[in-house]
Amino acid sequence: MLSMLRRTAAVAALAVLALAMGVSSASAHVAVSSPGATQGGYAVITFRVPSESATATTTAVTIQVPADTPLSSARIQPTAGWTHATTMQTLAKPVSIAGRDVTQAIDTITWTANDGVGLRSDEFQEFIISAGPLPESDQIVFKALQTYSDGTRVDWIEQAAPGSTTEPEHPAPTLALAAASAEGSDDHDSDGDGTEPSVSATASNSSDDSSALGVSALVVAIVALLGAGTAIVLITRRRVA
C-alpha cells in the first residue's frame, strides 16, 4: 500500500511539472485571441506578447495583416508607456467582405515602447485593437515581429506543415473566425446594434480565459500531490505506532 501511494505521489509530481511546463510553453509566444470573432463582423482582438530575452527588453512589436485576409479599419486601444502607428496598403485585387469591395486595408500596426518602458524577461503586454469588418475566411494568420533593445528581432511567422500537429518554434499568431449566421448577415458588428464592441470588456475576457484554464489544471495536480503526500504520512505514522 505504501509503495502504491509513493508511486501515486511520483505520478502527481510529474503531472505538476508537466502542467507547469505546458502553461509556460503556451504563454511563451505571441498569441492572438478574440472570443466570438465572426466573419463579416467587428471584434476586439488582443495580441499577447511575452518577453523572453534574459539580457534585453522588448521595445517594439509589429503586427502584419495579410492582404488576402484584410482588415479595412482598426481602432487601437492606447497602451500606457507605448506609442502606436498604422500603415495602409492598396490591395492588388479588391476583396469582397460583407457585400463591400475592400481596396484599402491595414498593412502593419506597430507599438513602440517609450524610453525605459520595454518589457523584461518576466513580463508580458497585451496590445488591443477593435477591427472590422473581418474577412470571410476561416482564420487570419498574422505575422508578429518582436524587437529587443539589443537590436535583435524574433519573427513569429511560421506555420505548421500541412497535416502536422507539431507546433513550429516561432508560430504565427492565428485567429479563428466563426462563420456568420444567416440572420445576422446584415449586421457587421459583434453587438448587433451597428456599433463596434467595447474594447475594455472584451479584452478582459480574452485575457482571463486563456490563463484560467492553465491555472485550474495546475491547481488540480497540486491537490492530487498533496493528497498523496498526506496519505503516505498517515500510513507511516500508523506503522510506527
Image: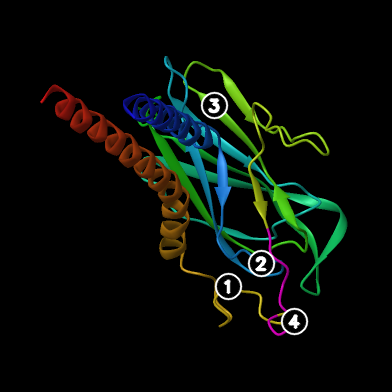
Marks 4 and 2 sit apart, C-alpha to C-alpha, by: 12 Å
Name the N-terminal-most of marks 1 and 2.
Answer: 2
Q: Which residue is mark 3?
A: 147
Residue 30: quadrant of the picture: top right
Cα distance in 3D space between marks 1 and 2: 8 Å
Local secondary structure at mark 3:
strand
Q: Check disc 4 and give the amino acid type.
A: Ala
Count of marks, rendered view:
4
Mark pair 1, 3: CA separation:
33 Å
The spot of residue 67 in percent (x, y) is: 78, 49
Q: Nearer the viewer, residue 11 or 107?
A: 11
Q: Decide: marks 4, 1 in contact (CB < 8 A)?
A: no
Q: Earlier in the sequence, mark 4 or mark 3?
A: 3
Residue that label 1 marks: 190
User: Disc 1 or disc 3, which is closer to the eye?
Assistant: 1
State the image quarter where residue 13 is shown: top left
Circle nearer the N terminus (1, 3): 3
Instruction: Quadrant for the N terminus, please.
Output: top left
In the image, the segment drawn in magenta is: 177-184
Residue at x 71% of width, y 82% of height: 186
Residue 185 in percent (x, y) is at: 73, 79
Q: For mark 4, what is the residue?
A: 182
Residue type pointed to by label 2: Thr
